[in-house]
Image: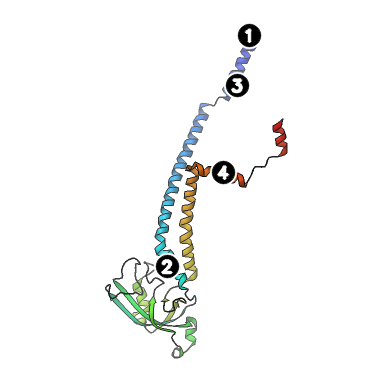
Amino acid sequence: MGAEVESVADNSSTDSLSAPRPKQKAKEVTLISLMETAKFYTSLCLGTTAFVSMFAFLFLIPFVVDPAITTILADYEPEAVTCLATDHVYAEGLRNCSWSSCREGCTNAAIRCHQILVNYSRTPFKEWKLRDPATVAWDVADTHFLVNSEGCGYPPRVNCTEFAKQYGYNSLGTPFPCYYSRTYPETVIARYNWDDNLQQLILSIIIPNLLFAVSVGVLSYWYCPGCGRACNKLYVEKYPIKVDDDDLEDDAY
């Protein structure tokens, strides 16, 4: 009888130790709830990031990517040459603004425009002061002068009023540095920097697409069971688990 009581007591003590405590259950439930909440808000942020990065890239195509590629294809002379403004006309109206040296806004029609014509010599501008201006021959005369490769832009980077004051009006006849296109020799621009142009192109392509790819990749791994299994399968095939012979012998016994 005493032995039975002791065995019952031992079983009850063992069950009490093995049974999870209410506090431990509550902690586990709270931890799971916090993880689910964190996953929900993280998923929301990732979805928003993917959505915004996609539209940001579409927005950057006409304003950054396309002008940068056009500039690269034009193959401008990296060293500034010498230009001389010969004529400056300020015009208004669509008929009179068939072309423009500077236009604020690249998507709207030019209603007001500055048209500046220049002569340029392939003589580097830094060597211009060392030569007699009367002996310098102009390589191209009365060609269109543009603020950049597109001839347009947005403030504060492009300010057509300041551009006209700097290169037109009273500045006519004063030599200044400019950059001509080796692909289209009649195209001359006021601003050019190969490093800045390439940097803008790379950043505008890589950053939005990288954010989009990472966001979609994480969301696919979390909410697409097939993607998770495929990733695990690839991981196992690439990094197989090595089992020692001693472990196999122990399992056999």
Mark 2, residue position: 67
The residue at which mark 1 appears reads as: 1
Q: Point out residue 215 in the picture as x, y percentages from the top left corner.
A: 47, 50
Give whichever of 28, 212 is nearer the camera: 212
What's the distance in space between the residues labelled 4 and 2, CA to CA?
43 Å
* Residue that label 3 marks: 14
Residue type (three-letter) at the residue carrying disc 1? Met
Q: Is residue 123 above or below residue 61?
A: below
Q: Nearer the viewer, mark 4 or mark 2?
A: 4
Mark 4 and 1 residues: CB-CB less than 8 Å, in contact? no
Residue type, numbered disc 3: Thr
| Label 1 – label 3 distance at C-alpha | 20 Å
Between the C-alphas of marks 4 and 1, the distance is: 57 Å
Q: Position of residue 224 (x, y in %)?
A: 48, 43
Per the model, the C-alpha gap separating discs 4 and 3 is 39 Å
SS of the residue under disc 2:
helix
Q: Which residue is drawn at 49% across and 32% down?
A: 29
